[in-house]
Image (cartoon, rainbow, N blue to C red):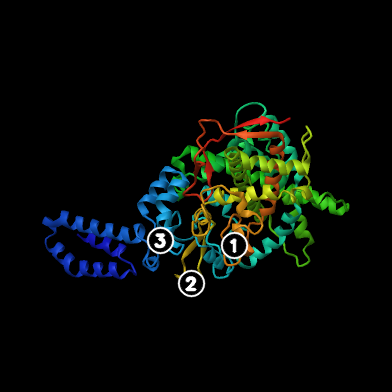
Amino acid sequence: MPLISTLVQQVSNSTNPAVEKITEAYATYFLPQVERHKDSLIPLGTAAALGFLTYRLYNKIIRAPIHLQHMKQCDYFTAIKYYFNNGLVHDYAREVIEPVRDDSPGIFTRFSAQGWIVDITDPVAAKQMVMKPDLFPKSESTNGVKGTLIERYVGGPNIVFLSGPDWKRHRKIANPAFHRALPVKVFGNLTQTMFKVIDEGPVDVTDLFTRLTLDAIGTAGFGFNFNALIDEHNEWVNGYNQVKEGMIKPIYILFPILDTKLLHWFPKRQEAHQSLTNFLSMLDKIILHKRQIIQERRNKQMEGDNNEKDLLTLMIESEMNEEDGAIMSDEELKSNLCIFFLAGHDTTAFALSCAICEFAKNPDIQEKARQEIINILGDSSENITPTIEQTKQMTYLNQVIKETLRIHNPLCTTPSRVAVEDVELNGTFIPKGTLIDVDIYNLHRNPKYWKEPETFNPDRFAPGGEADSHSTSGYPWFAFSNGGRQCIGMNFSMVQQRVVLSMLLRKYTFTLPEDSLHKEHIQKRGVVFAMVSLDEMKVNFKRRY
């Protein structure tokens, strides 16, 4: 029985009073009896140890930790089911989140890939958290697991996961780049290339917009065209897709040891790592080349059109113009490019796909948006790329985009933060060290703050409309986060969506096939990884000219 005694001693290092009492009773009364009769009671001792370990597992994993037990808790087993089967987000919300959200003040706890975390679906609490970045800095991006595919991609020093002075330095350099980089010509030219793909036959818009935005973020981000629209299976497209798909596989997120120490067991996973190595190496070469080109241009006092320069060029120029000498290392530039790429590719493709689907499901909304665009761009039988000034006039289309991002946000949750001290959020006590995030999906669909939240209604975002009613006290719309750490690429994404959708509205009408998967609910997946994905989405495009 010494083995059982040792095992119990190892697992009983707990601050939970209930566990400590059980451990003390086990050591004082039960173990001496077991040791005295070890030959006949080994099965009993083993069973007792296993029973204790089961209770320990329950207290440590299945049940929220004691310092969070004053909050409502989402059911562990139901959540785990969705983690492993990559279930629909709509079903996960209905079964796991909504029963707790609707029976709580909008602050509750759930089990996640990072462990137990506090979810916020209350706009006042969400505002309080993001307005106090010193009390709620970003947590570790990948739960501290080095060498996983996702850690290698997003785990470097970047603007999303840094805090304090380093974050301010990155933001100071990146801000001017994003305010100047609104390359409508790039977006317009790629959209016209996309028209040729649409005219070839039936279209899966999920795939189509993923290819479009891959070319857009590559070109506008660092001057590299993946040519995904023209050749969807070329080496770079296949490699990046392998990385992207690999990052969201639940098994490697929940069990990172499979992605590191046991990686040699999984040849396909090794291929994904090699594709990432190739991608990162390509970025290294581009950064080095850009620095050389920019320095040569500065020496010759040559300037270009800021609006059409790529983000990498603008960031390097920004740091060169900083009087206080603030710079980013090549490694920091690369890490930020990875973040911009991830945030600006699939998220925008997802939003565009959902907007087209909602247009197809709501022909009255589609036609109202089309008439606005025709009033701005005209109705001639030629492709027209709007100017920046014209995109600012697209009031109703902007409402459609915002409503799409409310009901179909590309992210289920924000990146997690951690409370650095005991604090209250809208009356709920948050202990020091607690992981916390904003549950965007369920905040945006919270019936306490949105009337008929499942209904697609762009008029919510009309001036003085429903969206404005809570904006002074809280943040009911959290599509790009809020506060000082609001998504730096918000304007970039919004302009791209306005350009693409306005050009599509002028040229085509959209309908869903009769057998569409998305007629009732748009089928979205992405419970473990915060970023949402779509099932195949076929849309019928009919040319107007």
In the picture as drawn, the residue positioned furthest to the right comes out as: 300
The tag earlier along the polypeptide, 1 or 2, is 2
Q: Secondary structure at mark 1?
A: helix
151 lies above or below 385: below
Q: Secondary structure at mark 2?
A: strand
Along the viewing direction, whichever of 277 and 186 lies nearer the viewer = 186
Quadrant housing residue 357:
top right
The tag earlier along the polypeptide, 3 or 1, is 3
Q: Can you tell which mark lies on residue 103?
A: 3
Q: Residue at x 66, y 30 (%)?
A: 542
- Distance between the alpha carbons at the discs numbered 3 and 1: 23 Å
Callout in the foreground (3, 2) = 3
Along the viewing direction, whichever of 79 and 368 lies nearer the viewer = 368
Is 422 situated left or right of 182 in this image? Answer: left
Is 303 situated left or right of 100 in this image? Answer: right
- Distance between the alpha carbons at the discs numbered 3 and 2: 19 Å
Q: Residue at x 16, y 66 (%)?
A: 32
Residue indicated by mark 1: 469
| Category of crowding for the residue at label 3, using alpha-carbon neighbours closer than 10 angstroms: few (below 14), some (14–19), many (at least 20) | few
Residue indicated by mark 2: 424
Along the viewing direction, whichever of 158 and 64 lies nearer the viewer = 64
Q: Amino acid at mark 1?
A: Ser
Where residue 366 appears, as percent x and y from the top left, is: 64, 40
Where residue 420 appears, as percent x and y from the top left, is: 51, 70
Q: Residue at x 28, y 60 (%)?
A: 55
